[in-house]
Image: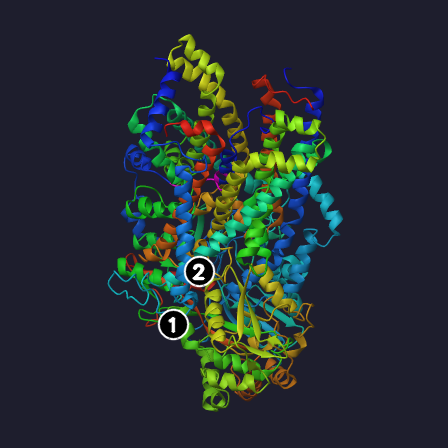
């Protein structure tokens, strides 16, 4: 394989496993800092129906059931084993619902929303970036585009709320929140359901699209311009190739590689960043679930979700590292 | 990893990319307008019924968070949501306490009488009750349930298991409609505390023929084919999903057949998720909800301005109904300098409770002299204190910064250059714990902190997540807190007063309680022998007995003298109901029962609703 | 005509029209514009602090819910209005803006310093050191940072601006580290560095004398990126209600406004003013970032947009 050596692959795999382990370990300790989940449940019940007699025994019994009283080391080993077998156990705050079923319900939403949104923003952004860098773009577009890109600079949260107010409350164009209209059963083949999903997903998807669009655009523009100064491009011009051909075969193709890298990295990491989006739009994905879990100090649920997030991110990065040299023969990972 | 490129990406691009990617999502652009046009002008927000007639036959209520497990209908599992119809449509209580009259009204149970020594209680069940699948509801089910709670795992205490273990020595069926409870000790409040929906819920009697042999913790109790969940209420579960639960009226309800009550008018009850206040209010303004749980004053006024049919419990200020858990300001009396009652009284004088009502609550609650909610049964006792001149002796509601200064300075504190009191080089500080989830609590904590700063105490807020907040109070690892730990009494004073009995005191670092729990049980670590003695004297007297009065006054005096905590304000619940489709709601003028619609007592409300 | 020649001609014409070539690449228009914007905010809040009573930023100090003075019901005593706990908006902004900027600054400083040190070590020394640093930075980038921040923030008893900045900085250092490492890697093989090594100049001297100056635009860019990223993360935390509670920050004002149903109540001044200031800050930083980008990558300078 060009560029790849067995030594390199082995090293990367080693680092992959190690990173995974380190992240997982950190995620074992951190939720435990956030307080006792049973304590939280009791406190909440107290707020609703007054003093809970027998609360101490209750808390003690639950702690034992969840193994929270076992020595830390034992808990840690159990945790590692659970992560490896993807058996995340019961959700502490929603007992006896299992973590897997909660995550299973939420993941399709996040994946759906994010994949669509990211791909859309990538395509749009890259196109805009390329156009911005190309000499022959009409003047009008050149002026309009940077304007749209400055929206990127504004904190999402604030504009998101403003737009919810505008498009949801005032103009009544979009539904208020959620993934789909209440009462509809999730059925991929039901047109009413699908339509409802699209309606509910438009605003969240759009916020992601327009915001990240700027990132892709600027990156692409930068790469295109850098590439433009390259010698081989001068040669291509000198040879008299058509501008369109130069644009596509040379400029874009060479600028795309880092873009695609960033895309895959982005996809892997974007799943983690959706807490804010889902919180704002009431979207029933893993981000909202994670936030709920954190407020309830629901260790098992937090660990389950985060582990999956970590897994996807690190795997995405690994894939990039292994695939990159195949795409760009100039790159070699030989140690110097 | 992208960084071994021969031609590295521009650094600003990389870092920009990082920061922009890091929070996933930014602004919008008028693309949305175009897209909206493509949608063809989507229909109005939220789920509606199938048309006007169905809406007029449906009672629509909100739930403020999505249901994680819509197939879980086991009242003993902590994950079950009982605010989506379990309490108000499905499960009926044996008795109901009416806050407005202080009477315990019969529902499934007819009578629950104690013997002279208050340690043997006899329950008589109404005749003719059947479960929704046709089986007879009788003493067997009661005995089965109590036995399950007594002998089952401690984890099911969300259903009062531990209390049954503590109080019930034995329970036996006398005849199909009579059950006899033998208690471990005299308890005048046995019926009140556990079987009368004292606050929100009460012990749920389970159908033996379904629950026998099931694991009480993991049993889902959901099987639409068999009509599970089975209880006695006038509604059956039609469908349940994450954000919508629909109940359908059951024409075979036992109550109608047995002549107990007529079938309630709403044919359907729907609970729909509406997570934020904005959404709640928007939908309500649009008449999509018939009752709203607590909202902020500003939101209510805006909503009422938009839709006059949304009316609060009290049409004028203060709009709200007071809920049982009076808001307190508690000191950790084990820590200096707050172990001195004069210092605590100084804080009380420094606090302006009117300002708390005006600013923290924007006018939607009332001041509280004692830590009891203002219900009929308790008002009588507070009035007693008034009549005996106790409030003249201890002017708890007075705002007197001069007196506060006097008290503080009498302990040797002097004001330093920057305005705060100091003594031996130490500044007079007070850290107030407040939970992040409860905005109401942190708002008044903020106002109190501000008021303390004005008199020279450096007050700071410590915002904690609920579990940590509760834990700190339990362990005594706090200085002051804005809490509601005295919650429990709603018609008789003993319950809340006993929470501050000296037997519950534990040293800092150990859980306070002595059988009590996190936010209850003397987290303030106040040990007063005289107070405890008086409270003990009240413990075994029957409800409403005139002998309670003198003990109550004596205990109240001790509390007021020492003031380990004081009431900041009555707890606000700004409920509002919609008169567009349904009338017959409880309100200040027509207070036939307390207003919460998701409590087990709300069967009364639902039966009282009529089509508008 | 040949496009390359066209471009040279066009650039020359442009330069002639502009009068003279800019004296230094640092006088980039966008950079200056951005710096001016951020500077104006800083200065005005400083002046504001001297001129306006900042104690009005505390609860219960002013009448509730007043609109700005140009709206009916407003008054010049509270020119930008008040919110529902009796805090004055102008005071809040005067106190909140520097706090927000400070958070960004702390994050940027820490992440840049750590990035320089670790990036140099990793890129220059290579080997085991490099591997360790890469693993650590990968881990820092892998863990869903917002999730951890939420957990940590919920646990910290007294969240103030500095603590929040430190928490964010814990995750912010990974990006600059990797970027600087990449730069160092590529610079290491360049002619002047090789020369220096051959002439037995000490490693530290090479790093600081030879390589660091060339990295300056990258460092500056990473600093600005850290600042925006820090403020952004802070706003994210604040949106969830986890920011510093005693000292106001712009993000907290907005999130409290949302909690207090400000949109519903039509109290646009409550969230509007801090939102505008935040936007201006970000646009300013954004312009600086683009400017620095152009300085670092000379080819971008000649580009038309």
The quadrant in which the N terminus of chain B is found is: top right
Please tell me whether residue B283 belongs to the stretch shown in magenta: no
Please tell me whether residue B22 belongs to the stretch shown in magenta: yes
Please provide the residue range marked out in magenta.
B20-27
In the depicted structure, whether residue B556 falls above or below residue B208? below
| Residue C301 located left or right of residue B219 | left
At label 2, counting other C-alpha atoms closer than 10 Å, the crowd grade (few under 14, some 14-19, many 20 or more) is many
Name the residue that disc number 1 marks. B358
Chain containing the residue with disc 2: C
Name the residue that disc number 2 marks. C95
The quadrant in which the C terminus of chain B is found is: bottom left
The color scheme shown is rainbow
Residue B103 x %, y % = 46, 75
Q: Secondary structure at mark 1?
A: helix
User: Secondary structure of the magenta portion, mostly?
Assistant: loop
Q: Secondary structure at mark 2?
A: helix
In the depicted structure, whether residue B254 falls above or below residue A196? below
| Residue B521 located left or right of residue B490 | right
Q: Marks 1 and 2, Cα distance to the nearest angstrom?
A: 25 Å
């Amino acid at each position: 394989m060009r560029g790849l050596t067995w030594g390199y692959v082995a090293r990367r795999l080693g680092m992959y496993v190690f990173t995974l382990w380190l992240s997982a370990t950190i995620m074992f300790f951190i939720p435990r800092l956030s307080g006792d989940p049973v304590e939280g449940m009791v406190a909440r019940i107290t707020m609703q129906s007054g003093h809970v007699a027998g609360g101490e025994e209750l808390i003690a019994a639950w702690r034992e059931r969840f193994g929270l009283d076992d020595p830390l080391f034992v808990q840690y080993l159990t945790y590692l084993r659970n992560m490896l077998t993807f058996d995340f156990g019961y959700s502490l705050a929603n007992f006896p619902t299992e973590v897997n079923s909660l995550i299973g319900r939420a993941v399709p939403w996040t994946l759906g929303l994010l994949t669509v949104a990211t791909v859309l923003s990538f395509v749009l952004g890259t196109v805009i970036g390329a156009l911005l860098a190309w000499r022959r773009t009409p003047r009008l577009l050149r002026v309009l585009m940077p304007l749209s890109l400055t929206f990127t600079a504004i904190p999402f949260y604030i504009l998101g709320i403003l737009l919810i107010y505008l498009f949801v409350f005032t103009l009544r164009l979009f539904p208020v929140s959620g993934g789909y209209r209440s009462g509809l059963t999730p059925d991929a083949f039901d047109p009413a359901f699908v339509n409802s999903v699209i309606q509910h997903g438009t605003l969240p998807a759009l916020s992601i699209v327009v915001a990240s669009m700027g990132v892709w655009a600027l990156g692409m523009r930068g790469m295109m311009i850098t590439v433009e100064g390259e010698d081989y491009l001068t040669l291509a011009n000198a040879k008299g190739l058509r501008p369109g051909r130069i644009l596509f075969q040379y400029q874009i193709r060479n600028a795309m590689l880092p873009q695609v890298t960033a895309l895959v990295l982005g996809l892997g990491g974007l799943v983690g960043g959706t807490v804010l989006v889902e919180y704002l739009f009431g979207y029933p994905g893993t981000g909202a679930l994670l936030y709920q879990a954190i407020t309830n100090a629901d260790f098992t649920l937090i660990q389950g979700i985060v582990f999956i997030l970590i897994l996807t991110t690190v795997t995405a990065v690994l894939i990039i590292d292994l695939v990159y040299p195949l795409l760009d023969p100039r790159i070699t990972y030989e140690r110097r | 990893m992208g960084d071994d490129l021969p031609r590295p990406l521009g650094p600003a691009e990389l870092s920009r990319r990082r920061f922009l990617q890091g929070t996933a999502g930014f602004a919008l652009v008028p693309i949305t307008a175009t897209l909206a046009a493509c949608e063809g002008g989507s229909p109005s927000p939220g789920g509606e019924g199938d048309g006007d007639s169905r809406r007029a036959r449906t009672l629509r209520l909100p739930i403020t968070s999505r249901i994680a497990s819509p197939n879980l209908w086991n009242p003993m599992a902590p994950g079950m949501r009982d605010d989506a119809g379990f309490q108000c449509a499905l499960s009926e209580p044996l008795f109901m306490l009416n806050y407005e009259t202080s009477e315990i009204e019969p529902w499934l149970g007819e009578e629950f009488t104690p013997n002279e020594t208050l340690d043997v209680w006899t329950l008589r069940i109404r005749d003719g009750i059947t479960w929704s699948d046709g089986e007879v509801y009788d003493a067997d089910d009661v005995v089965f349930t109590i036995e399950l709670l007594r002998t089952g795992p401690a984890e099911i205490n969300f259903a009062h298991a531990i209390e049954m273990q503590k109080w019930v020595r034995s329970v036996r069926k006398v005849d199909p409609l009579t059950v006899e409870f033998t208690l471990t000790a005299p308890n005048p409040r046995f019926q009140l505390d556990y079987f009368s929906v004292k606050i929100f819920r009460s012990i749920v009697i389970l159908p033996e023929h379904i629950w026998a042999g099931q694991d009480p913790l993991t049993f889902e109790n959901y099987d639409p084919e068999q009509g599970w969940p089975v209880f006695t209420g006038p509604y059956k579960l039609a469908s349940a999903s994450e954000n919508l639960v629909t109940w359908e009226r059951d024409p075979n309800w036992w109550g109608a057949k047995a002549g107990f009550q007529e079938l309630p008018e709403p044919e359907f009850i729907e609970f729909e998720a509406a997570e934020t206040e904005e959404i709640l209010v928007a939908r309500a303004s649009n008449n999509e909800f018939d009752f709203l749980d607590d909202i902020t004053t500003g939101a209510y006024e805006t909503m009422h301005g938009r839709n006059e049919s949304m009316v609060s419990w009290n049409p004028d200020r203060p709009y709200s109904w007071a809920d049982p858990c009076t808001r307190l300001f508690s000191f950790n009396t084990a820590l200096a300098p707050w172990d001195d009652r004069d210092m605590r009284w100084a804080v009380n004088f420094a606090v302006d409770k009117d300002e708390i009502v005006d600013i923290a609550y924007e006018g939607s609650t009332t001041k509280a002299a004692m830590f009891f909610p203002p219900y009929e049964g308790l008002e009588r006792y507070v009035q007693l204190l008034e009549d005996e001149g106790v409030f003249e002796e201890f002017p708890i509601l007075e705002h007197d910064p001069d007196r506060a200064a006097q008290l503080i300075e009498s302990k040797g504190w002097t004001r330093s250059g920057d305005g705060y009191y100091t003594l031996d080089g130490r500044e007079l500080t007070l850290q107030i714990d407040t939970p992040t989830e409860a905005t109401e609590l942190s708002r008044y904590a903020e106002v109190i902190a501000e008021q303390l700063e004005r008199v020279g105490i450096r007050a700071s807020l410590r915002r904690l997540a609920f579990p940590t907040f509760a834990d700190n109070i339990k362990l005594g690892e706090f200085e002051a807190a804005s809490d509601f730990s005295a919650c429990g009494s709603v018609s008789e004073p003993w319950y809340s007063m006993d929470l501050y009995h000296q037997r519950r005191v534990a040293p800092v670092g150990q859980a306070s309680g002595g059988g009590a729990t996190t936010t209850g049980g003397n987290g303030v670590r106040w040990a007063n022998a005289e107070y405890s003695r008086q409270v003990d004297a009240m413990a075994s007297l029957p409800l409403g007995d005139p002998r309670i009065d003198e003990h109550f006054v004596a205990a109240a005096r001790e509390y007021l003298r020492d003031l380990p905590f004081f009431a900041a304000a009555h707890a606000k619940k700004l409920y509002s109901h919609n008169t567009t489709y349904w009338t017959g709601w409880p309100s200040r003028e027509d207070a036939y029962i307390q207003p919460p619609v998701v409590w087990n007592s709300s069967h009364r409300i639902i039966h009282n609703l009529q089509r508008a | 005509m040949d496009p390359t020649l066209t471009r040279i001609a066009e650039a020359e014409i442009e330069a002639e029209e502009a009068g003279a070539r800019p004296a230094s690449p640092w006088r980039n228009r966008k950079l200056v514009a951005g710096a001016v914007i951020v500077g104006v905010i800083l200065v005005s809040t400083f002046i504001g602090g001297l001129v306006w009573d900042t104690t009005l930023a505390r609860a219960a100090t002013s009448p509730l819910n007043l609109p700005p003075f140009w709206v009916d019901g407003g008054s010049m005593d509270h020119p930008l209005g008040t919110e529902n706990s009796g805090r004055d908006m102008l005071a809040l902004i005067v106190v909140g803006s520097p706090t927000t900027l400070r958070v960004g600054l702390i994050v940027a400083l820490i992440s840049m310093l750590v990035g320089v040190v670790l990036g140099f070590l990793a890129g220059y020394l290579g080997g085991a050191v490099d591997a360790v640093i890469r693993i650590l930075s990968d881990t820092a980038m892998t863990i869903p940072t917002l999730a951890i921040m939420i957990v940590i923030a919920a646990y910290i008893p007294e969240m103030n601006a500095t603590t929040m900045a430190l928490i964010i900085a814990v995750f912010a250092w990974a990006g600059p580290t990797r970027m600087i490492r990449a730069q160092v890697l590529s610079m290491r093989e360049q002619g002047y560095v090789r020369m220096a090594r051959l002439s037995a100049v000490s490693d530290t001297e090479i790093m600081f004398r030879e390589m660091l100056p060339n990295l300056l635009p990258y460092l500056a860019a990473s600093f600005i990126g850290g600042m925006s990223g820090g403020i952004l993360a802070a706003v994210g935390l604040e949106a969830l209600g986890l920011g510093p509670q005693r000292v106001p920050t712009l993000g907290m004002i907005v999130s409290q406004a949302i909690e207090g149903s400000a949109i519903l109540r039509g109290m646009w001044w409550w969230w509007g003013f801090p939102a505008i200031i935040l936007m201006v800050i970000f646009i300013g930083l954004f312009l600086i970032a683009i400017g620095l980008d152009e300085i670092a990558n000379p080819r971008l300078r000649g580009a038309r947009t």
